[in-house]
Image (cartoon, helix red, strand yellow):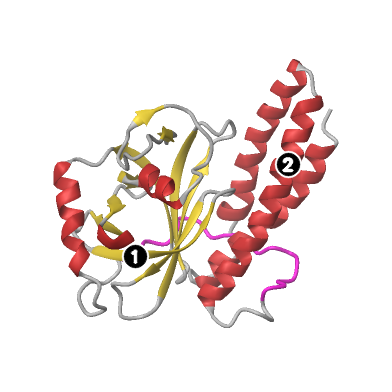
Amino acid sequence: MRFARAFAFGCFLSTALVATAYAETEAQFVQSAAGVWRSDGGSLLTIGPISNGLIGAIDSTGTSFVAQSSKFNEDQSYLTLKIVSAAAPMTWVLREVWNADHTRFSLTLTANSGMKMAFSYVRDLEDEDHAALAKLASRRAPSVAAAPALQPAPHRVAVAANADPCSDNASDAPAMLECLEGQREQADKALNAAYKTTMARLDDGGKQRLKLDERAWIKQRDKTCEENDSGLNAGSRAVEASVECFADETRKRTAIVQTFK
């Protein structure tokens, strides 16, 4: 898990390690995500900015991809990416997953194919990493570089009980994922607002209890939405179900936080 960074004005590669809030701009998000990361399976992913606003990544096998940002969400700290180095249209979601105190984060990468990987921080980019990423700038043509083959998450996700209101409007898997991420975003905003309001009215003892309770809830939410065997095969529906589940659990949590004593 990585400590959040402070961002020096005019210096895209500032590396002061201090606690801060979510990235306020897309550039800050890319800066904080840049580095070498290790997946749960042990493979390494080097990710960082390249020329013309593109983002590049190289995995342990040397497989690379080039992406263009599509949508940045400041409040929930995720970036939707369109892969421009693959023959078929692909949309990925790169998310910073923060701890309960919002002082450190890890990364998750979700593809519209349904593959999902979690990454822990290893180190900052070094000169040789920047050089390798810079070589990807010319690899925008679809025939040049294929996106890395992500491994399925080790556990299947739970299907949310509620009906999916995005089904009538989403025309394909990327659109469905973006719609569901929007629902999750709204649920997260409501929970964050409830958390701040409740923390403001609690005494010091109550604040500590809520923090501990929040950490326990995050673990339980992850177990419910990611580790519970739903019987789904790996694929885009698995990711959609995971996002739905996270939104549902977040809505339930909001009601609890609002009345926390």
* Side of 35 relative to 73 (left or right): left
Residue in front for this viewpoint, 110 or 50: 50
Range of magenta residues:
148-166
Q: Quadrant of the N terminus?
A: top left
Neighbour tally class for label 1: few under 14, some 14-19, many 20 plus, Cα within 10 Å: many
Residue at screen point 70% across, 53% down: 187
Q: Could you give the CA–CA distance between mark 2 and mark 1, rounded to whole angstroms? A: 33 Å
Please name the residue that numbered disc 1 is placed on: 67
Residue type pointed to by label 1: Ala
Q: Is residue 160 magenta?
A: yes
Residue 52 horizontal/vertical position (percent): 28, 62
Instruction: Report which quarter residue 240 is drawn in.
Output: bottom right
Instruction: Report which quarter residue 171 is drawn in.
Output: bottom right
What is the chief secondary structure element of the magenta stretch?
A: loop
Label 2: state its secondary structure.
Answer: helix
Residue at screen point 69% across, 42% down: 192
Q: Quadrant of the C terminus?
A: top right
Residue extending farthest to the top is: 204
Residue 229 horizontal/vertical position (percent): 58, 59
Residue type pointed to by label 2: Ala
